[in-house]
Amino acid sequence: TLNLDDRDEVKRYIYECGRLRHPVSNTHKVSQEDFSARIGDKIVTFRKGTIIYIPLLLAGLDEEIYGETTYQFDHNRKNLCPFSTMFHSFGEQTNGRICPGKEITEIMFIDVLIALGKMRRDGCLSSQ
């Protein structure tokens, strides 16, 4: 059972939800020069200005970071928050792209989840 009186545990719960179901599905980068990449058994060259789609969800499914239980829900897993890409960054590291509302969003999500969780446990919210 989630301890609704422990803000850090609630934060980890939210981060685990975000790891498995990203709130933002992708980001992108525009290449600054021509580049080549192997696709299947071919080398394909792309021109400067090519938009490169980066699926953020895949970062949350890296077994080297999250281990054998990558596809299982575990809000107490090692490396959860430091390696999250939920806010367009890699944990607290950034390459110039991070959600400007990260801090207020974390506080708001935690407050809302605690309030709704307590209401639900007290029977104030219908399951319908």
Image: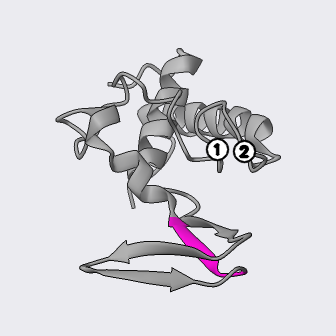
The quarter of the picture where the C terminus appears is: bottom left
Q: Which residue is at a point 70% across and 39% down the rendered structure image?
A: 94
Asked whether 63 or 128 is in front, the reply is 63
Q: Which residue is mark 2?
A: 95
- Horizontal relation, residue 128 to residue 10: left or right: left
Magenta residue span: 49-54
Residue 58 vertical placement versus 91 (above, below) = below
Q: Which residue is at a point 74% across and 41% down the rendered structure image?
A: 102
| Crowd rating for badge 1 (residues with CA inside 10 Å; few <14, some 14–19, many 20+) | some
Q: CA distance from mark 1 to mark 2?
A: 7 Å
Q: Which residue is at a point 65% across and 81% down the rendered structure image?
A: 50
Q: Are marks 1 and 2 in contact (CB under 8 Å)?
A: yes
Q: Secondary structure at mark 2?
A: loop
| Mark 2: amino acid | Asn
Q: Residue furthest top?
A: 6
Q: Which residue is at a point 57% across and 31% down the rendered structure image?
A: 114
Task: Give the label on residue 109, or none.
Answer: none
The image quarter containing residue 8 is top right
Q: Secondary structure at mark 1?
A: loop
Report x, y in % for residue 7: 58, 19
Task: Identify the main secondary structure in magenta.
Answer: strand
Residue 32 vertical placement versus 127 (above, below) = below
Q: Which residue is mark 1?
A: 89
Residue 44 drawn in magenta: no
| Crowd rating for badge 2 (residues with CA inside 10 Å; few <14, some 14–19, many 20+) | few
| Mark 1: amino acid | Ser
Report x, y in % for residue 49: 72, 81
